[in-house]
Amino acid sequence: MAVETPHTTEEKKTLPLLRTEELLLNLGPQHPSTHGVLKVILTLEGEKVVKSEPILGFLHRGVEKIAETVTYNQFIPHTDRLDYVCAMYNNFAYVRAVEKILNISVPERAEYLRTIVAEVQRIIGHLFWLGTQALDIGAMTVFFFTFRDREVLLDLFEELCGARLTTSWYRVGGVERDFTQKFIDDLSRFIESFHTKIEEYDTLLVNNRIWLARTKDIAVISGEDAVAYGLSGSVLRGSGVDYDLRKVSPYGAYDKVEWSVPLGTKGDTYDRYWVRMEELKESTKIIRQCLAQLPEGEYKAYLPQVVAPPKERVFTDMESMIYQFKLYTDGFKVPEGDVYCGTEAHKGELGFYIVSQGGGKPYRLKIRAPSFIHMGAFDFMAKGYMIADVITIFGTYDIVMGECDR
Amino acid sequence: MNKLFHSAFFTEILKALRMVFGHYFVKEVTLQYPHEKNTLPDTHRGALCLLRYESGEERCVGCDLCNAACPSYCITVVSAVEENDHVVRRFATSFDIDMTKCVFCGFCVEACPVNALGMTKMYEYSTSNKRDLVFDKAKLYEIGEKWHGQAKGYLIAHNQEGEDETVSEYRYRFPSSRKQEEEQKEEVEAQVDG
Amino acid sequence: MSSVGKQSTAPGAVKNMVEITIDGNIVTAEEGSSLFNAVKWTGVELPAMCYHYSFSPFGSCGLCLVEVEGKKNNVRACTAKVIEGMVVRTGTDEMVEARKGAVEKHLTTHPLDCPVCDKDGQCELQDMAYDLEVYDIKEAKRKEIPEDTRSIVLDFNMERCILCGQCINVCKEVQLVDALCFYKKDKQKHVGAHGGETLYCEFCGDCLAVCPVGAIVSKFSKYTFKPWQLKKTETTCSFCSDGCTITLETSDRDIQVVTSELSYTSKFGYEVEPGEGHGGICVRGRFGFDYVMSKDRLSKPLSRENGSLQPTAWFTALMQIGKQLNDIKTTYGPQAIAGLVSGRCTNESVYLFQRLMRSVLKTNNIDTAARYGHMNSVHAMQTALKIGKATITYEQLALSDAIFMVGSNLTETNPIAALRPKASMTEYGGQLFVADTSKTNILNLATHPLQIALDSETDLIQALVKVVIEKDLADPDFIEKYPKAYENMKSAAAALSQTALSEKTALEWGKIEETAEALANSKRGVLLWGEGIVSKPDAYENVLRLIDLALLCGLFRKEGAGVLPVCEENNEQGAVDMGGVPEFLPGQIDFLSQSDRERFSSTWHAALPEPGQETSGFTLPEIIEAAHRGEIKALYLVGENPLGTLPAEMKVREALEKVDLIICQDPFLTETGEMADYVLPAAVFAENEGTYTNMAGAVNRVSEAFDPRGEARPDWKIFTDLSKHLGHPIQYRSVEEIHDEIAKMVPGYYQADPPKPQPEAYLDAQFISHISGRYAATKPPQDAETEIHLSMEQVLYHSGKLTTRDKGLMKIYNKSVLLMSEADAETLGGLITGDPVHIQSELGQLEVKIEVSPNLPKGLVQFPIHFNDPPVKDLLKVEVDPLTKVIYFKKGVVTLERPASVDLRVLPMETPPETIQQEAQETPSEEDTEVS
């Protein structure tokens, strides 16, 4: 592209013409702020981004193909490794899809347990996002504060299911293990004190001029464009589109508690930040109400053909022994058909599309990963901004490559 | 005016600094690993181990259900027939878990129909030789003996076993063999005759 | 035998179709057939545990319950018969509950054996309990029955048994063995041998295959596998010429179990076409897999250094072999090189071997195991009919209405093919005529058993021909087309004396007439002959006589009728078809046919060896002879072991000592291998790709289940590698390419249709003039009263020498004993089973233990051909057929004597003789295993 130079015609004669051209810059896949192994080929005009082309697939593990070779239950640990910082959501979205194709429902207590843990996971996810986003922009302190609080919640997860990240706690027909009183107490204590933590983050960021400069009016996307690009979750709501699956098609116990959907106005990075901070508060609200309403009952559905029998019965009952073997070898039989089920994860709409031809293994499984969909809007949103903003834009999607590349 | 004041004197930065320095007087949350270690809950999914009955008999019968349940197929079981005490038994001649493949999901423990597998809180077994990370039967039993309490705790915490040791009530046992029975009878008869 | 379960009526039978209502739909079904099938056809899946298509419904499990209008109680659909106007409901809630109850009943007494049970994962009880959602059973009571582990092959775990009776029914109705039954012991119902004895039967293992739970378990793979651990490979069995499709279930490089189509999972095969087999396999196929994993397998090539065989590298061995072969070829000429290929190699291996020998080494001295007998059938059929293989399929054999079987102990040699004549009798109402000298299994089962005198097969066939001609039953088509041949036959047959024939065969004339009439009047008659014809002198003529008989009965003209020559090894037929004999190029094309020679030489890019003055190439006996004369300098043995197979009279050892270079390519180190200069480890069938041709001419696929053990290689790889060292590389990238070349060079070989016979030879004057000679009266036997005939017989549990290396089969049968008739044992002074006897012929003598058998006629003793210890085969005189060059060493005359030193041990009175038998057989087996 020819760019006019300020030189006079005389100077033009004496000085050689400055060669100006677009600069191709490979960002990543080893760049630390690309949240994994994302590569973006940036076309720069000076410092301005003219075009950006995300190259995906460095973390591709063929998870969707693996799903075709394992039983429905065996795939649960594989879902842990999609969005590896928020495994609970992947579990949740997956088991919901399987339950939908099986056309089964879970006990009420299980629905509450699932909702509580999902919201805890949302807090963890947002804290993780906040820490890393701030870190990417240059504010290191926030990272320490958010990770301090995330640790507490991860310890709770470990208390609950034995692992901090690769949880595999959700099961088809319920959850793996009930809450203990200790878990409930610890969680309540955390929830009660969490607003002070949020205040701390706000102290660090909300008026910070650098933060504001780096986020305000950066990567603006209008509501219409956001919908057109298929964006979801906080990214969509940051643009003022009131779409939250938890409200639109409620699941779990979301329709039994009071909460609201925070919406941004401008659709810039700051609005998305603001939406997420508000969601932290909403999540605490949901958790608090759920814990208060937590009904008594079973945490697993009574569905012998789907849910493995309790272990004590396996030792004493012939039929339980048989079901144990049938379920762990062949898996439960899923009727022929296909189903799509979307769940509102903290990143956006995490959907599973399952095609079953009958039998114990999916014929085809497709994951609608929000990170992947969001990367589709990257070029649109990065166009015209500075190269330094590119990192901010990665961050604003809350991208995790494990989920994006699958 | 106020805005100008704030921007001139970096008030928001100072506020933040005050908050951050205030944390000098808060109890630190960081653990100085390896000098300090976190206490792990009973549910912790650590290294796998094999367990024995209280009589010292191996629980594992080599049914390979753990391998069938494993999402990463990291368990290899080879079973064989063993004949002693007039009972024909099935037992695992080799039981290998490839810890490099293991995803610590605990499905094998859930699947095990005799509760032969347990998970311990053991997580420090890094090695310079990758081959050492294939735990064989001997190693798994060794871990099981060393961390028996942890493994039991895991099973109880994950609803795999009742806390009130009802384990002895297992209905499962190997049938005795008729050949052996008759041989025994013959022996007895021979003794009587003699 | 009634068989409502099986949709199996003789072809052409009229079915009476009636209308019934099932779940509101009007359906037409055959009257009197099983209601279960009628329901199945409507698409309703009725659960059933005791049902199997291969036998009649039994109705023990109580799962296929339906509601029939007008009946108070629920009806078991399998045993209920279709009656006009029935109104049936299948899916009502009560029915579902009733079915659940039936499963619950079984579960209440079932032990919690799933973790250890071998059937877990493919257990029908598991499937039923899961599918019907049987849960929350209130009461449970364990049966507490000890496991019956007395049998050497099968363990019976009656705790797991659901008493469905499938094992008993398949044994009784399909195998016609009837070894199993229900019996009561300690107030509990058991399944086992009659009277609760230790089971010793044919061990076909069909009971194991149909058992829906883990009540019957194979000892050879007990507690060693779970189904999900195993990789399944469908391949073809490598033992007899039946060519059964088997499934190798392997983990790593170990075969854990061998299964077949017959199983509880394929039980609803009511769609099976009439005549299709039941899908089972025999004892050899099912339990004879251990030799594949044997430690005795060769793992490295061996070469002779300083007098002993030393391991060497493949490259070195092949390079040296190539160099030495080339040297011999240039020094002594290609005639000094000979090769023998086993009848167990795949078609592709044989094809490649003969290509290597003919196009690279330029020699036509190649031969195969078919020279022990089957070549007689091939030659005779080629001469008379222009085809060299069976003209019928197994299906046609099963649907036949009259089968004449001579000289074949089919149930022992080919147990699965033998099920076809059995089915023809029991299922399709056919007649079975079995002519044999001893009371074989199939003879006892036959509708028309014809026990004939020793060595009177010729007379019997002559008599049958005579009857057909004299009763004017001959096929008018044959008379019209070949009047001269018919006239010759007629005049020759007229000269035969009826009384003499009747006397010689020791059969009443009426029985012979009955047989001949049945054959001549049959619609789908089948003639079947085996080694009792082809491995005895005069075999070529006997086969021609049988062909005459078939022609006279019109068997080659009628649809579904024909002849079936039985051969021994799994791919004998294929080895001949692939040109593994000097007479034929691939496709049984005459080696001297100029146009075909050109066709092959242009494909192979090499000239074929020119036929010599006397012969076009040496056959097996000629190779041995030439080796004696010192004319053979190099001998390439592919899976052949002449030293172990041929009797001492052939002086094989002396012959081989004169050969400069012996290359032995075998999975094991054989006797011949020990003499060889190079021993190349070959892959076994489970490690090979390719095809086998069974005795009916069908080509079956062989698939690789795992890589060869050690450094063993598949034959085709060895041949291609060797050809490089010989300077004429034959290049194939895979077996598939060889396969394609065969398909190109032998058009139509892989097509399933049996070939059409062309009996044009019967127009040939020269051929016709031979006919009269065929119907001359045979010489009367000498000293018929005192003479004792020794016959080498095949045993059900073994196949060739190969299976003697199989631990499992040796455990089942390791009796190297002389079978003797009661009369002979009495003559020798009241010998009983287990006693030693002196056996003597002109060639030597040895001592062998005897077993008294009620099935043998006087004057006949039998010894299993599989065992060389004691070397009974060396007592036999060898005769070589002048025309077909087949070596006869199946039968001979011996004298028996009671040994001088009589064993004076006192036998305890109460011990039954069987116990002694077992003791006697166990001792050598242990020694054997130790030595090997």
Image (cartoon, rainbow, N blue to C red):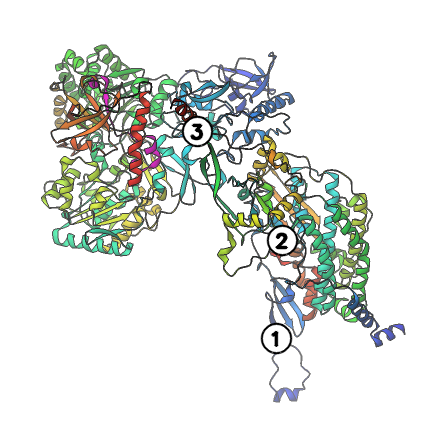
> In this picture, is C346 found above or below C538?
below
> In this picture, is C167 found above or below A348?
above
Q: Which mark is residue A82?
A: 2
Badge 2: how crowded within 10 Å, few (<14), some, or many (20+)? many
Q: Quadrant of residue A396?
A: bottom right
> In this picture, is A147 found above or below C279?
below
Q: Indicate whether residue A391 is drawn in magenta.
A: no
Disc 1 target residue: A21
| B13 left or right of C156 in image | right
* Mark closer to the observer (3, 2): 3
Q: Quadrant of the C terminus of chain C?
A: top left
| C485 left or right of C44 in image | left
> In this picture, is B120 found above or below B55?
below
Badge 3: how crowded within 10 Å, few (<14), some, or many (20+)? many
On what subunit does the disc labeled 3 rest?
Answer: B
Earlier in the chain: of badge 2 and badge 1, it is 1
Q: Quadrant of residue C208?
A: top left
Residue A301 image position (x, y, % from top left):
69, 37
Q: CA distance from mark 1 to mark 3?
A: 91 Å
Establish whether labels 1 and 3 are both on one chain: no
Region in magenta = C803-825
Q: Which mark is residue B180?
A: 3
Could you tell me if the residues under marks 3 and 2 are in contact, i.e. CB atoms within 8 Å?
A: no
Q: Quadrant of the N terminus of chain C?
A: top left
Q: Amino acid at mark 1?
A: Glu
On what subunit does the disc labeled 2 rest?
Answer: A
Establish whether labels 2 and 1 are both on one chain: yes
Q: Amino acid at mark 2?
A: Leu
Residue at the location (68% across, 44% down)? A177
Q: Secondary structure at mark 1?
A: loop
